Amino acid sequence: MTELSVLQAVRLKGRVTPADLAVTLGDDLDGITPIVEQLTESGLLVDGTALKISPSGRARLETLLAEERSGIDSATIAAAYQDFRAVNADFKALVTDWQLKGGPAGKPNPHDDAEYDAAVLARLDDVHARVVPIIDAAATQLPRLNAYSSKLLVALGKVNDGETAWLTRPLIDSYHTVWFELHEELIGAMGLTREEAARSGDAQ
């Protein structure tokens, strides 16, 4: 477990309990406790009701991410990012159709039409099949991104088993939560901020 991976996970979560942090990092609580304690003692994390990253932690993380970017093939990441943007548009449309009937200007989906919901959820398998090779390509430069394939697969499995909360529910590693974090990672790997990405039409 690296300093970068822990700081990045806490930053992406905003606030997270140590137990939930362990889950999202694919470790157990005992495995992450030493580095969490170290980062807390050094002031990079703040441990209250939940862990959060401190201003000095954000600065340290930006340094670590910049060092990481300096060793990657930017053309490979740029290609993966562009491919992701196309799939992201389809995933956003899927989520909109899950939450609203009739498009962005429609009414909240009461989920009382099983045929409609099934048709929306059926599109998730295609989205997943398209995003996995993109993650694989990006992970040739940033191996830690491989974890996103595993986390998306777990969420997909739960959705396909009928646990539809795992599509969009916040505060768990739902498909949407993991997708959002992957998007953040790719934006960062490009050396962009979310605001800069949004100005180019790439918003979650």
Image (tube, rainbow, N blue to C red):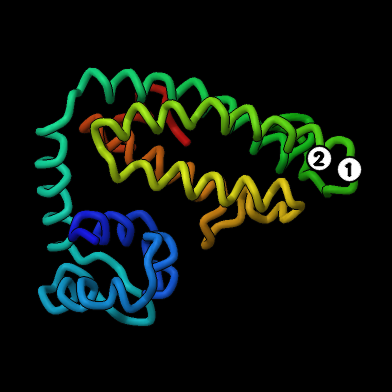
Q: Report, in whole angstroms, how far the alpha carbon at label 2 lies from the one at label 1.
A: 5 Å
Query: At 68% across and 56% down in the image, what residue appears?
Result: 165
Q: Is residue 98 left or right of residue 112?
A: left
Pinpoint residue 143: horizontal percent, then vertical percent: 28, 40
Q: What residue would you read off at disc 2? A: 117
Near-viewer residue (200 or 168):
168
Instruction: Identify the image quadrant of residue 13.
Output: bottom left
Mark 1 neighbour class, 10 Å CA radius: few under 14, some 14 to 19, many 20 or more: few
Query: At 26% across and 61% down in the image, what residue appears?
Result: 6
Pinpoint residue 14: horizontal percent, then vertical percent: 37, 61
- Residue 114 is tagged as 1
Q: Is residue 50 left or right of residue 76?
A: right
Q: Secondary structure at mark 1?
A: helix
Pinpoint residue 58: horizontal percent, then vertical percent: 18, 57
Instruction: Identify the image quadrant of residue 78.
Output: top left
- Residue 190 is tagged as none
Near-viewer residue (192 or 20):
20
Relative to residue 72, is residue 152 depicted above or below? Answer: below
The kind of residue on which mark 1 rests is Ala
Q: Are marks 2 and 1 in contact (CB under 8 Å)?
A: yes
The kind of residue on which mark 2 rests is Asp
Mark 2 neighbour class, 10 Å CA radius: few under 14, some 14 to 19, many 20 or more: some
Q: Secondary structure at mark 2?
A: helix
Query: At 83% across and 48% down in the image, what residue appears?
Result: 111
Relative to residue 126, is residue 170 depicted above or below? Answer: below
Instruction: Identify the image quadrant of residue 145.
Output: top left
Q: Is residue 199 left or right of residue 128?
A: left
Relative to residue 134, is residue 114 depicted above or below? Answer: below
Quadrant that contains the N terminus? bottom left
Query: At 63% across and 53% down in the image, what residue appears?
Result: 166
Near-viewer residue (140 or 117):
140
Pinpoint residue 181: horizontal percent, then vertical percent: 41, 46
